[in-house]
Image (cartoon, grey):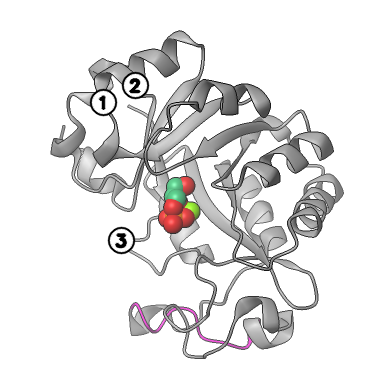
Amino acid sequence: MKLTAHRGVSSLAPENTLAAFRKAADMGCEWIEIDVQLSLDKVPVVIHDQSVKRCTNGDGIVAQMNLASLQSLDAGSWFSEAFNDERIPTFEQTLLLANELNLKVNIEIKLYPGDDIALLCEKIKEVIVQLNIDTTQLLFSSFNLQALKQIHALLPQVRRGLLCKEIPDNSLDLLLEIDAFSMHCHYQFLTAQQTAKIKQAGYEIYCYTVNDPEKVKDYWQWGVDMMITDKPQAYVTI
Ligand code: G3P
Ligand code: MG
């Protein structure tokens, strides 16, 4: 059974923090999923929302704050006081830790309206190249097809997964366009027929964000390859 810890083990530690990634390694997870966007001074940082409000003690738009301001914030107390030392990690810090802990990383290229797709992809590439990360340990994903095309051009050796909520009718065309490895969709909308179609075409299929294993117990037989979950610990007993 293949599991990806969504934003790290985000049910047991504040999402997208080094603590959440360490938890994933402690629990024996093979993969973590992270969300990457750019700070104002163009450093790739790991945070999901457009704003820092929900997951830190600050307020403001990530793309309008420089790295120093972002990292001055407490990114853990909103979850629990035990995590008050956590900071918004850079993509670089995250990859270094993942490398040390032998975690594979699903890098979601997170874009909000007005973001510079090409620049985000270029900066992501720079970090990966600079750190000389083994690219077999990485998988890109994005809801944004343009971003996947861009990163394909920059780092063709890293696999790509197309993110969608519901699998569109033209999914095979889109997957072909980005020379994809996988299709990632919301589990509630997936059918056995769609799974068969994607698998027969030679792609892996991943579901997010499945926190109750009961809800997807048939999906493994359908051929789903990976569940992306906040709660890897919930799968231990099945
Ligand atoms: O990669 C799966 C999932 O992370 C996509 O949605 O909003 O949690 O980034 P979101
Ligand atoms: Mg994500």
Between tags 2 and 3, which lies in front? 2
Between tags 3 and 1, which lies in front? 1
Quadrant occupied by the C terminus: top left
Name the outermost residue toward the top.
Answer: 200
Q: Secondary structure at mark 1?
A: loop
**Which comes before the other along the chain, label 3 or label 1?**
3
Query: For the residues marked 3 and 1, what is the alpha-carbon distance in whole angstroms?
Result: 27 Å
Q: Which residue is mark 3?
A: 11
Q: Is residue 35 magenta?
A: no
Query: 92 or 204, which is in the foreground?
Result: 204
> Decide: marks 2, 1 in contact (CB < 8 A)?
yes
Magenta region, mostly helix, strand or loop?
Answer: loop
Q: Which residue is mark 2?
A: 194
Q: Amino acid at mark 2?
A: Gln
Q: Which residue is mark 1?
A: 191
Q: Amino acid at mark 1?
A: Thr
